[in-house]
Image (cartoon, rainbow, N blue to C red):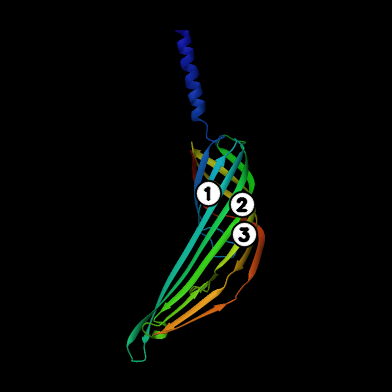
Amino acid sequence: MKKVILTAITGIIIAGNAAAQYLPEAGTWSTEIQFTPWTSGSSFQLNQYGVKGRYFVSDKFAVRASLGFNMRTEKGFEYGDDWDGKEVEQKTVNRSTGLTFLPGIEWHTSPWERISIYYGAEAGIQMQFASQKITNAGFETGDTYEVKGWTEFSNGTVSNKGFGFVVNAFTGIDFYIAKGLYMGAEFGLGFRSFKTGKIEETTKSGSSKNTTTYDNHTQTSNLGFYCMPAFRIGWKF
């Protein structure tokens, strides 16, 4: 009987310890989503909406990959008369889409039961797409004006098609609010180089169509500290 009781108590202690294991272990996967609502469209913005996955090779070491995505569409309408005095609706559509892919590594230390502090590095690519299309351009029915590789929004923000690469050294913290569920923050030092692509301009009026390509290459580089003011929430499994 004593052995049965002792075995039961031991089982309860082991189960309790297992239930108290908040931090990830070797072989654990985790994923998180982040939403950055306060970004202003600056040149160093990486993600507005993003997801990140991590795999813990050991209790301390993890590999990760982040995928960022942001998209903006703006439609504008103006009304005027064509050459025949007929009212025509001129529609302008501006679009901008950005993609970022950043694989990296993390090294974790856990001074407290529910808190994991980490540091690491990541490097990857960034792509940007932009376009503008005006339907019934000049208030002439059927005429169109389209630009691929560039757009300007009503607030003056300009977006260009381009390609770049990003390198970040970072540190962060994960706070486990429940077993397998955490929130966190991250900041670090980042470098970004971005080169814009060609601009293609097409006008169409009746059966006439004209396309012009501009070599509008520019290259910008940014180096500085960043703090991603994001809502991060993730879970491990």
Amino acid bearing label 3? Phe
- Image vertical order of residue 2 relative to residue 171, above or below: above
Quadrant in the picture for the N terminus: top left
Q: Secondary structure at mark 2?
A: strand
Residue matched to label 3: 165
Number of labelled discs? 3
Lateral position of residue 80 relative to residue 168, left or right? left
* Residue 4 pos. (x, y %): 45, 11
Q: Which residue: 57% across, 73% down?
A: 198
Amino acid bearing label 2? Phe
Residue matched to label 2: 187
Q: Which residue: 50% across, 47% down?
A: 32
Q: Which residue: 58% across, 70% down?
A: 197
Residue matched to label 1: 52
Tell whether label 2 touches label 3 (CB within 8 Å).
no
C-alpha gap between disc 1 and disc 2: 15 Å
* Residue 113 pos. (x, y %): 57, 34
Q: Earlier in the sequence, mark 1 or mark 2?
A: 1
* Quarter residue 63 falls in: top right
In the image, 187 versus 196, the foreground residue is 196
Q: Earlier in the sequence, mark 1 or mark 3?
A: 1
